[in-house]
Amino acid sequence: MFYVLCSTPMAFASSEFETTYNVRYQVQADERVNVNQNISLTNKLSSVYATQYSLTLQSGRIENIKASDEEGPLKIEVSENNDITIINLTFNQQVVGTGKTLNFNLSYDNLDLAYKNGQVWEVFIPKIANPQEIDNFILWLAVPANFGNPAFINPEPIEQKTEGNLNYFRFNKSQLAIAGVSAAFGQFQIFDFMFAYHLENPNLVPGETEISFPPDTAFQQVIFKRITPLPVNIRVDADGNWLGKYRLGPNEKLNITAEGKVKIFAQPQEKFLKPSLENLKNNLLPQKYWETEDLLIQAEAKKLAIPRAIYEFVVKTLDYDFSRVKEGVERKGATQALNEPKNSICMEFTDLFIALARAAGIPAREIEGFAYTTNVKLKPLSLVADVLHSWPEYWDEKRQIWVPVDPTWEKTTGGINFFDKTDLNHFVFAIHGESSIEPFPAGSYKSSSSIGKDVQVVFGRYEQEDNPKLEVDFKIPKKIFAGFGGEGEIIVKNLGQQAFYKLELSFKTEKLNLTLPTNEKVQLAVLPPFASQPIVLKIKSSDWWSFGRGTLSVTANNQEFNTTIKIGSFFWQLILPLVGIVLAIGFLAIFMVKQKQWQLKNT
């Protein structure tokens, strides 16, 4: 997908020719992209003329090559080597003279530029490799109208129009000199996943451990079908990871399976929670592999200062080393990556970006997860076994979101822009912000007996989602006395399959007074699937003389849950019986005295 315009210096020197390109990339329903180039070469000197044209494409899947000038078809020579295609054209005419123009056309089908992946059409058009040799360049991207509206297009087209059944998007030289065009059509991407976790407690005493399930982020929503067996609970850590707690007995082994779907969005979801100020501060701190206090890191960070400059520096500085993609590869960290830039994989691209960003005062963190690719040579998956890829995120204070970027893939694709928008194929497994190592992502939980692949991710289909359901358990006294009360809690349980955000609980009572952590309402910031949240409360009767039955109602997610509490009368149930007992004892004492007196009288 890397596109190079190259030729012999004598024929195409910018001082000798004025060059104009009008190019159209038309996407077909069979994933072919028909590329049509109308090219004009105008002589600037009387003593030179063009005889040949050469085009180098980083793709081995080029078909239906055609070329012609004003005198007819051109001689075409094609050579291929290691997925590189070189097209050489020999012109029929020799246009001589200052101001004279040679017009010719080249068209071909490229099978590596557009893909229907799951729910999304993706299109990538590479940048211009030698913009200094081109005077005028216009590019039109044409896609079938039934693809729908774009989820995103980078850079933003300078013109859009519709003709017939095609939507057109126009770009110019200045845009394509910086980066290629990346576009996605579709509302969201869907992956089905199945993860296996293998836990083992080798100790002679019971133990607890946590595993990380894929969490919601601003750009993804996770829907669980099932987790078997269910964890004791799932909590959300400061970075937003979902951590499930499991208890294991002595020498116990436990295999866990998690199945579900993930939706990946082009635009951030509004309901997603914002990080705390404390978390943002912690995402500025040095960590293992993120040596922000290193003098060289600090010097570069001071010069770069902003995320885009840091990203471009990482892309420009590091070179991807395919030979290091093997199991057990050592993670070098940011400082070593900067000192040894030729031997990097995605870990080093990520670590260097994070260290530079943090040193520049920009909160940044690492993502480990899955990234779908159709070409591992252009979009390598640098982490082996079950964890496939890593990429960084930085905090955008203005937009109030964590922004994912992928400097590794921009480097290996020869300039596809993964800064302004990654794509819809990056699936987050675990977030590393407050720690550069933990939690471990899915695929990392192995036991001494586990073998095979523990991460399975495939494209999924949209299905009507079940409405999320809650359950409320009442752990409060079944009986209280009028004027007195007791303490207890309610436990709010998410029965799956999605997380609740800003979940409001409202309370209503009859013959009861309720004391809550807040006033009449409680809001839970987030409740992941299969998680539970206790809420402590105090309850007592509304007065000293009411007795009978009181009710407590809790409403959440348009569901109402009720419980009944028996209210006993302190007077009738405690004092009056006590008085009765005293009177009975008194009467019994009098009787016994009288009995004793009668016995004495009759002896």
Image: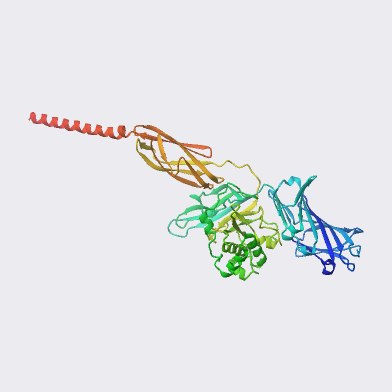
Q: Position of residue 236 (x, y in %)?
A: 52, 52
Give the farthest residue toward the bottom.
339
Looking at the image, residue 195 sits to the left or right of residue 316; the answer is left
Q: Position of residue 401 (x, y in %)?
A: 59, 53
**Colour scheme:** rainbow
Q: Position of residue 525 (x, y in %)?
A: 52, 47
Q: Position of residue 29 (x, y in %)?
A: 76, 49
Looking at the image, residue 294 sits to the left or right of residue 162; the answer is left
- For the N terminus, give its image quadrant: bottom right
Count of number-bearing discs: 0
Q: Which of the 4 image quadrants contains residue 203?
A: bottom left
Looking at the image, residue 24 sits to the left or right of residue 469; the answer is right
Foreground of the two, 26 or 358: 358
In the rendered image, is residue 380 in sight?
no
- For the C terminus, give its image quadrant: top left
Residue depicted at x 53% and y 40%: 557
Foreground of the two, 393 or 264: 393
Foreground of the two, 495 or 179: 179
User: Can you say whether 450 is above or below 192 in the image?
Assistant: below
In the rendered image, is residue 458 in sight?
yes
User: Can you say whether 285 is above or below 228 in the image?
Assistant: below
